[in-house]
Structures are given as C-alpha cells and as structure tokens.
Image: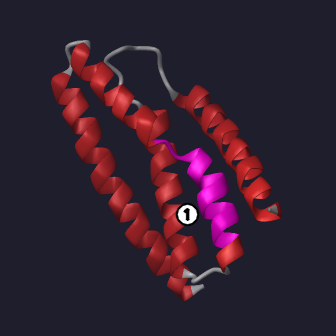
C-alpha cells in the first residue's frame, strides 16, 4: 500500500515537473513545434532506459519509472498537439512531430539502456 501511495505522489511531482518544463519552453505560436512536450518525452524515455538498463530494484522501478517518469512523460499531450497542428493547417508539422518524437524517443531509450548497463 505504501508503494502505491508513493507512486501516486511521485506521479504528481512528475506532472508538475512536466508542466514547468513545458511552460518554460513552449511558444504560443500555433504552427510551432511542441518542443516542451518533445523534450519531456525524450528525457523520460532516456531515464526509463537507464532505469531498466541498470536492472534497478523492482520498487525503485515502480517509484521512479511508473511514478515520477510516468507523470513526467505524456503520450496524450503529444498526440493532442500533433492533431492540433494538423487541424490548424500544418499537416507537415504534425507528421514531423509524430515521426521525430518517435525516432528520437526510441533512440533515447536505446541510449538510456546502454548507459544503464554500464552503471
């Protein structure tokens, strides 16, 4: 029960951290690449990769991976921003956001796992 409560609390902290990064980076231009969401997702993918590559303790993986990083990263906002770009008349920017975020996020996980194995 304590782990479940801690995961929830850390998820809330991760969400606040995501909000802070997003607010500090994102421009209000409707055609702008959603850099804030991109960065939190790539950072989160890398960090999750490190966690799993290091074969971290199960409870630590739950707390940091599922809790904090689960709250920090955001699939729904990424898809919403991609759809918004498309509807607002920027279909190439929407496709670029999906493709670039997927590719760089995957590379982030791969690099994180490699680093985690060295640690």
On the image, which quarter does residue 90 sit in? top left
SS under mark 1? helix
Q: Quadrant of the C terminus?
A: bottom right
Locate residue 100, reporting x and y percent: 28, 46
Note whether residue 52 is visible: yes
Bounds of the magenta segment = 60-74
Query: Residue visible at 60% across and 62% down?
Result: 65
What predominant SS class does the magenta segment belong to? Answer: helix
Percent across and percent down for residue 16 are 69, 37
The residue identified by callout 1 is: 47
Q: Is residue 1 above or below residue 88?
A: below
Q: Is residue 33 visible?
A: no
Residue 99, position as x, y percentages in the image: 23, 45
Left or right: residue 8 versus residue 43 is right
Is 119 inside the magenta-drawn segment? no
Q: Is residue 99 left or right of residue 37?
A: left
Magenta span contains residue 73: yes
Q: Please give left or right for residue 94 compared with residue 15 in the image.
A: left
Which residue is rendered at x = 67% and y = 81% of the image?
57
> To which quarter of the image does residue 34 belong?
top left
Front in this rendered view, residue 115 or 12: 12
Identify whether 28 is placed above or below 93. Answer: above
Q: Is residue 40 above or below residue 62?
A: above
Residue shown at the point (62%, 32%) measured from the top left: 19
The residue positioned farthest toward the front in the image shown = 1
């Amino acid at each position: 029960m304590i782990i479940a409560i801690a995961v929830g609390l850390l998820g809330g902290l991760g969400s606040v951290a995501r909000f802070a990064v997003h607010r500090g980076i994102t421009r209000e231009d409707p055609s702008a690449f959603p850099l804030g969401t991109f960065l939190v997702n790539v950072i989160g993918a890398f960090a999750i990769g490190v966690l799993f590559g290091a074969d971290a303790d199960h409870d630590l993986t739950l707390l940091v991976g599922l809790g904090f990083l689960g709250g920090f990263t955001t699939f729904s906002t990424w898809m919403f921003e991609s759809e918004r770009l498309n509807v607002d008349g920027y279909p190439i920017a929407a496709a670029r956001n999906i493709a670039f975020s997927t590719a760089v996020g995957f590379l982030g996980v791969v690099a994180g796992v490699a680093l985690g194995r060295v640690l």
